[in-house]
Image (spheres, rainbow, N blue to C red):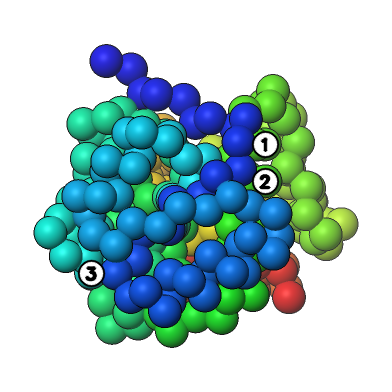
Amino acid sequence: MGMVAWNCMNNRILIVEDDEDIAELIRFHLQKQGYATEIAMDGKTALEQFDAARPALILLDVMLPVIDGLEVLKAIRYDRHSTVPIIIESARGEETDIVTGLELGADDYIAKPFSPTVLVAKVKSLFRRIQNDHKAPDDLVTTKRLSLDKNKHSCLADGASVELTATEFSLLAALASEPERVFTRSQLISTTKGSDYPVTERSIDVQIATLRRKLKGCGNAIKTVWGIGYKYQED
């Protein structure tokens, strides 16, 4: 069975959170922004509500009663074959759960305790990113400081031309195409698939260091997210 495409025709968000106060706080701030919301207090109810309502996005706590969040994530991605956007919530000390969640197919994460404003910003950003993914592919990747042309294999950083290998180019294009998204090393490996360099988790670190050096001042935009991977974020 193929993946079930994300339904971009509604703005319903499923909040999966066993702390009622936190769930209601999230609901309040999302509804202020015009989103429709539903709350599930455990993993079993979350899957039932997902099957019944097909939300446009899921906020998923890792620590849940009955069925934990990572099992819910696996059930949605691998049993139900759904591409629905999912943001996982995790306490700051649970880096392993964050990495596992991203590897299982979560689109982003937010660490507890979090600001409702930051959460709403992440939701809006994820909606924009997924909507852009459903548009025709763009051969140009541009930010304030970068300009990448995939057809010409050209890179300008702060207006200066930068020579990149095929794998370095793919790596930078992946990061810059989705600013502030955190990529695990495994996700970057599957994205780059460069033929000019053996792509391993260790080589990703080496290539990031090389990219930073080649991009000079612009290289500071490639941020290390300790214990997880990398993201592109211009200051």
Q: Amino acid at mark 1?
A: Asn
Q: What residue would you read off at disc 2?
A: 128
Quadrant position of the C terminus in the picture? bottom right
Q: What residue would you read off at disc 1?
A: 132
Q: Are marks 1 and 2 in contact (CB under 8 Å)?
A: yes
Q: Amino acid at mark 3?
A: Met
Q: Earlier in the sequence, mark 2 or mark 3?
A: 3
Residue 41 in the image: state x and y as whole percent.
29, 62
SS at mark 2 in the image: helix
Pick the residue in front: 93 or 174. 93
Is any part of residue 159 visible from this angle?
Answer: yes
SS at mark 3 in the image: loop
Q: What residue would you read off at disc 3?
A: 63
**Above or below: residue 227 compared with residue 52:** below
* Residue 30, quarter of the rendered image: bottom right
Residue 27 in the image: state x and y as whole percent.
53, 65
